Image (tube, rainbow, N blue to C red):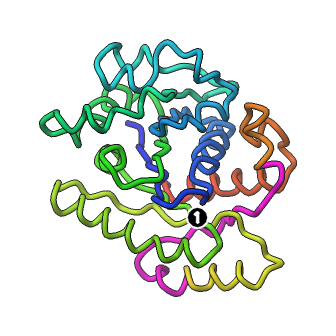
Amino acid sequence: MGEILAIINQKGGCGKTTTAVNLAASLAHLNKGVLVVDMDPQANATTSFGIDKLDLETTIYSAISGQVNVKKAIISTNVPNLFILPSNISLSGIEVELGKIPNHHLVLKKLLEEVKDIFDYIIIDVPPSLGIITINALVASDEVIIPIQAEYYSLEGVADLMNTIKLVEKRLNSPTPIKGFVLTLYDSRTLLGREVYNELKKYFHKKEYIFKSIIPRNIRLAEAPSFGKPCILYDQDSRGSKSYLKLAKEFLELDK
């Protein structure tokens, strides 16, 4: 039975999709079967694998709306062992549609239960919001990973996210443990980056796990999506690739 993880943060620009794509690719590189579920209408995770979102006949929306079986919507990527439930702009209206369905918070959970035993890991890329899609992702997930950009505004937003997770647990009786926090876009040369990391450890190390693997600011990580590749395919020797591979190994150690 596979493990379902949501990569979540309501703040944009924190490296959420970058983490979803590159952690998934690194796990696949380590011979794990991985499915990425792109739940963002912007479809950045989809295009990060060189998939033309405008040319897709079936997407996660097709599966959620019942047009196709979820297995029919899954496609392979340019990374061995890695598959994706792609997205495009058609997903943008799903919150209105789901809002009309009883128990709409269970839709994604039921969908992924059909494929959970096929993969070692299912990684959900969640949009930067706290709406119905995010709630669906939380309910569907076994655990969540929270990327945090190395700046103070990111720390402030974590409180809102933690409250949302607690509300989902309480009102929907759906506990979603936090697997850990990942510090992203880190620049060790700046005092700010070091201060944010220290603050993160100060406030969360007693209750929540903080990954020792830190994701640096890296030009190769920024360039890779424009070439339709995760960084491990674009430049395996870059600091960005090595950091996500280190994160994947640390992640697997936690699962032992």
Task: State which quarter of the image contains the N terminus.
Answer: top left
Find residue 217 and report its horizontal and vertical position in percent. 77, 62
Q: Nearer the viewer, residue 131 or 107?
A: 131
Name the side, left or right, on which 95 lies relative to 2: left
Q: Is residue 235 above or below residue 215?
A: above
Q: Report crowding for label 1: few under 14, some 14 to 19, many 20 or more residues within 10 A (C-alpha).
A: many
Name the side, left or right, on which 67 lies relative to 200: left
Q: Is residue 181 above or below residue 249?
A: below
Tell me the quarter of the picture where residue 49 sits. top right
- Asked if the magenta segment contains residue 214, the reply would be yes
Tell me the quarter of the picture where residue 71 sits. top left
Q: Residue at x 47, y 79 (%)?
A: 204
Report the magenta stretch's main SS.
loop
Q: Element at badge 1?
A: strand
Find residue 12 and report its horizontal and vertical position in percent. 55, 57
Q: Residue at x 44, y 48 (%)?
A: 5
Q: Is residue 7 above or below residue 214?
A: above
Find residue 47 and report its horizontal and vertical position in percent. 64, 31
Residue stretch rendered in magenta on the structure: 201-221
Tell me the quarter of the picture where residue 186 sits. bottom right
> Furthest residue to the left?
102
The type of residue carrying mark 1 is Val
> Which residue in the protein does label 1 denote?
182
Name the side, left or right, on which 183 lies relative to 172: right
Q: Residue at x 70, y 64 (%)?
A: 185
